[in-house]
Amino acid sequence: MWTTFRHAEPVMGTVVSFDVRHEAGDQHAAAARAAVAAGCGMLHEADEVFSLWKPDTVASRLRRGALTVRECPPEVGEVLQRCADARQRTEGWFDPWAAPGGLDLTGLVKGWAAQRACDAIRSAGLPAAMVNAGGDIACYGGPEPGHAWMVGIQDPQHPGKVIRVLEIAGGAVATSGTYERGDHVYDPFTGRAVLPTLQSATVVTSDLGLADAMATALFAAGEGGLSFVTAVDGASGYVVRTDGSRRAAGPLPVVGGRPAQ
């Protein structure tokens, strides 16, 4: 049996929670605390670079033309490249360059930063961890040896009720919808808020930055966007339509192997 270390960090406009499993003993406990502290540091550094709520961040200055990409730290170029890749993969439905008000990288950054934090914990040699960034999850291993993490998809009509449970031994899960945050997803082709045909859209893939971007794109595109989700190797999508009916596509890892409907 492993020992559990948990921590919740307010950052990036949300709370990021860590659930880290480690061998018993003071040395392993100290390693878990240090790894989580390093992960939290990465999240705060990302917030200081990419937040658009603060006028003096790199992202804010880049957005208004006060900086060029060459003048930005290297992680900005990395995120821009990932955004360009996500735009191509989603057939333009995820497009930070088309955001109202100018370049907005936040649709990918939270997932990207949480994935980096999770990867840092793994690199520290800890056997398992889950990083939950406001409901978007990166993980590896499981809560105990031989078991996967259980990740629930929430019923958008009944907050707190889980409509599907996924078994995730390693990878990422992200969900987009208007039921918690209102109309925050925009159609990149019109610049206007999406007229929803879905209540929520969930993407399961290997990387949380990509999952975050693709969930936003899937919600914006509607059910037809499941085709670009499943075009990514190993990725799955799960949508809840406005009438409450559901559809899954791809190898959705459902508990007990039951079909996801």
Image: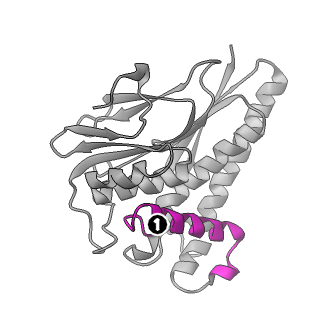
* x then y, percent, for residue 187: 30, 67
Dot 1, how many residues are within 10 Å of its Cα: few (below 14), some (14-19), or many (20+)? some
- Can you name the residue that lies furthest to the left here? 243
The residue type indicated by label 1 comes to: Gln
State whether residue 235 is above or below residue 109.
above
The quadrant where residue 29 appears: top right
Question: Is residue 86 part of the magenta span, yes or no?
Answer: yes
- Can you name the residue that lies furthest to the top here? 1
State whether residue 118 is above or below residue 27.
below
- Can you name the residue that lies furthest to the right here? 27
Q: Which residue is mark 1?
A: 88
Quarter of the image for the N terminus: give it.
top right
Question: Is residue 133 part of the magenta span, yes or no?
Answer: no
Residue placed most toward the observer, 220 or 154 = 220
**Residue at image location 33% in from the left, 27% down from the top:** 259
Residue placed most toward the observer, 169 or 158 = 169
Q: Which residues are magenta?
A: 69-95
Quarter of the image for the C terminus: give it.
top left
Q: Main secondary structure of the magenta part?
A: helix
* x then y, percent, for residue 80: 57, 69
Apparent side of residue 237 relative to residue 10 in the rendered image (left or right): left
* x then y, percent, for residue 14: 49, 49
State whether residue 168 is above or below residue 64.
above
State whether residue 47 is above or below residue 238.
below
Q: Is residue 18 visible?
A: no
